């Protein structure tokens, strides 16, 4: 776990913020001038179903889950323009980063944010009805503009899910890394160490990866169960690939 003055946290500027041109507003609010936090990594991500499902794994099975996946993948805000579906993923670093960003983001529910913390980012969010197949309202989706890691443990899981070590300057790497000694390919939901037509090479010998990812891949390739799913490890390597689901 990083020292408290080197804490890192994940922020996602979600599709509703992009659609409403609130990116600059969010970035200003989270700027070093206001928070004393620094950028460690930034990327534009076309969010795949796999990445969305791993990011929101804890909500699987809940009534709002399918709508939440459509929201974060951009389907809700860009139904007719898939090329505009993206989020901005940012790693911020500095003292007390997790708490500082959560504080500025405000409560998850935009209505509660407006009532209890006017001026926080999520106070500008909205609630949207979730409909069933017949058009009846069965719940509400919280379109709350940004995601911010809730705890240090969540930050570690989420940063490793969205970012490769290569996306972050080496001097700012928050977690242990190691050099890969194998070729690892992903195709049709499976991991292999040999190339077959259409598979994507996620790692090659010499590539630097999160050490915990390499440990998981070694176990999975050997037929054992790892503490994280294969999708959790490979999702970031499939982001912005031409073939989203090889
Ligand atoms: P959390 O894991 O608490 O950050 O929640 C992730 C996202 O799921 C939130 O930003 C909301 O968009 C959505 N969400 C969480 N709880 C609910 C809920 N009870 N009803 C609808 N959406 C929710």
Image (tube, helix red, strand yellow):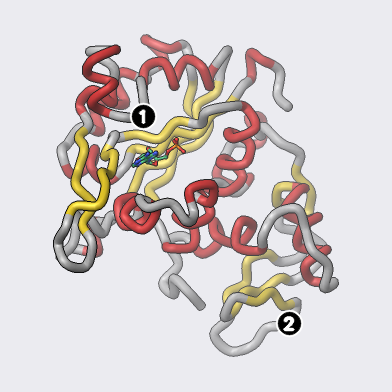
Whether residue 15 is situated above or below residue 122 in the rendered picture:
below
Residue designated by label 2: 194
Whether residue 83 is situated above or below residue 98 in the rendered picture:
below
Q: Earlier in the sequence, mark 1 or mark 2?
A: 1
Residue at horizontal 36 percent and vertical 42 percent from the top:
88
Residue designated by label 1: 108
Relative horizontal placement of residue 209, taking residue 95 as reference (left or right): right
- The percent coordinates of residue 157 (x first, y second) are 62, 41
How many residues crowd around disc 1 within 10 Å: few (fewer than 14), some, or many (20 or more)? some
Mark 2 residue element: loop
Label pair 1/2, CB-CB below 8 angstroms: no
Q: Quadrant of ligand 1?
A: top left
Residue at horizontal 54 percent and vertical 56 percent from the top:
236
Report the front residue among 3 and 209.
3
The answer to whether residue 46 is visible is no
Residue at horizontal 51 percent and vertical 78 percent from the top:
246
Relative horizontal placement of residue 118, taking residue 174 as reference (left or right): left
The answer to whether residue 136 is visible is yes
Report the front residue among 156 and 183.
156
Residue at horizontal 29 percent and vertical 39 percent from the top:
142
Report the front residue among 1 and 120.
120
Q: Quadrant of residue 102?
A: top left
Image quadrant in which the N terminus is located: top right
Mark 1 residue element: loop
Relative horizontal placement of residue 87, taking residue 235 as reference (left or right): left
Residues at marks 1 and 2, CA–CA distance in whole angstroms: 44 Å
- The percent coordinates of residue 168 (x first, y second) are 57, 39
- The percent coordinates of residue 76 (x first, y second) are 22, 55
């Amino acid at each position: 776990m990083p020292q408290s003055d080197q804490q890192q946290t994940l922020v996602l500027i979600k599709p509703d913020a992009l659609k409403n041109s609130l990116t600059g507003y969010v970035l200003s609010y989270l700027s070093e001038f206001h928070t004393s936090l620094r950028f460690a990594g930034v990327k534009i991500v076309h969010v795949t179903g796999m990445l969305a499902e791993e990011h929101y794994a804890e909500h699987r099975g809940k009534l709002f889950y399918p709508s939440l996946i459509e929201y974060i993948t951009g389907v809700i805000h860009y139904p007719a323009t898939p090329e505009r579906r993206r989020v901005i993923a940012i790693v911020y670093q500095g003292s007390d980063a997790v708490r500082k960003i959560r504080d500025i983001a405000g409560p998850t529910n935009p209505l509660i944010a407006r009532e209890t913390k006017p001026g926080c980012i999520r106070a500008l969010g909205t609630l949207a009805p979730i409909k069933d197949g017949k058009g009846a309202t069965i719940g509400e989706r919280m379109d709350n503009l940004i995601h911010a890691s809730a705890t240090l443990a969540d930050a570690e899981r989420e940063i490793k899910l969205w970012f490769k070590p290569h996306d972050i300057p080496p001097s700012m790497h928050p977690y242990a890394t190691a050099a890969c000694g194998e070729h690892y390919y992903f195709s049709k939901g499976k991991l292999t160490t040999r190339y077959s037509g259409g598979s994507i090479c996620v790692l090659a010998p010499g590539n630097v990866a999160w050490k915990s990812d390499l440990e998981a891949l070694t176990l999975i390739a050997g037929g054992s169960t790892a503490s994280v799913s294969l999708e959790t490890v490979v999702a970031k390597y499939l982001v912005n690939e031409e073939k989203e689901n090889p």
